[in-house]
Amino acid sequence: MIAKLRIPTFEDVRDAQARIAGNAHRTPVLTSRTANAMVDGELFFKAENLQRAGAFKFRGAYNAVSALDADARRKGVVAFSSGNHAQALAYAATLLGAPSVIVMPKDAPEIKVAATRGYGAEVVFFDRYSDDREAIARAISEERGMAMIPPFDHPDIIAGQGTAALELIEEVGELDMLITPLGGGGLLAGCALSAKALNPDCRVIGVEPEAGNDGQQSLQKGEVVRIAPPKSIADGALTTFVGYHNFPILQSKVDGIVTVSDGQLVSTMRFFAERMKIIVEPTGCLGASAALNNVVDCAGKRVGIVLSGGNVDLKALSGFFAGA
């Protein structure tokens, strides 16, 4: 476990909002009468699939890199990621004049690898089922003097991600419930900070893939639980444990964690493509899938849902639909 933790607060989210203003997109909030009718409530979709680099991760990445001093930026940054943090950190680093190295699983979607390289990063591959990605990244950090910025277990990352919920609530007003995807916990923790600060009665729910419910197990047990590498189409949520900076926030501010199946994710991706004319990746559909499949009861409630990303290979998307 990390020896010394700096747990972010809502004030850190406010600071992040000021830091990323004019750099991260203030993404739109989408609604659908059909979706509302399906759940008998009001759903507000925060479209982070339309964020720079295609996912909410740009918020935390830009906040974390911009918080480094000039010397650290000159030396550069290193991270490990299945794709969205990879792209976001590469893009943010390039915008801020810092070199970047990203450690990615060799089975990461081709579109994410190509985009990461396109944003200016050097990519180093690893096997997610046998290699320790954090150890590889840490070795590069020590060898090259680069700052390591993990995808979720970092206070500046958490604060940056929390700006998504802050913007959502600023735009639509008080929510009865906020639902977000859960992988390592950066998005859920940051959004929980915002939601509870703005309305303590707002219920905050995280959603994991069925195959990887380490967050759910962790809250039930009262400590961070590590699991074997899970297999799911929700590649952005295939973490083996939630972050240690995130866990205290999840314990104190999250009201529940639920899971959805890959089949439910596919049906939700199809709904967005056919009815709302947007592309949302499997991980990005986690929160919406829990609502639209009635895993979470939204009847009579105003519910905010973060669509966390849209970086899905079109060949993979067609394959998901063909197999449904």
Image (cartoon, helix red, strand yellow):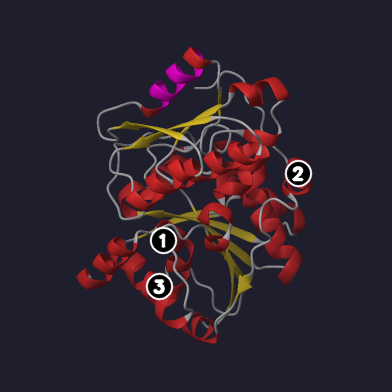
The mark found on residue 86 in the picture is none
Asked whether the beta carbons under mark 3 and mark 2 sit within 8 Å of each other, the answer is no
Earlier-in-chain disc, 3 versus 2: 2
Q: How far apart in space, not on screen, are marks 1 and 2 (Cα)?
A: 27 Å
- Residue position for label 2: 19
Q: Position of residue 321 (x, y in %)?
A: 27, 71
Q: Secondary structure at mark 2?
A: helix
Which stretch did the figure color magenta?
134-142
Q: Position of residue 278 (x, y in %)?
A: 47, 73
Earlier-in-chain disc, 1 versus 2: 2
| Residue reaching furthest to the left | 323
Amino acid tagged 1 = Glu
Q: Name the quadrant of the C terminus.
A: bottom left
Earlier-in-chain disc, 3 versus 1: 1
Q: Residues within 10 Å of mark 3 (few under 14, many from 20)?
A: some
State the predominant SS element of the stretch in magenta: helix
Mark 3 or 2: in front is 2
Q: How far apart in space, not on screen, are marks 3 and 1 (Cα)?
A: 17 Å
Amino acid tagged 3 = Asn
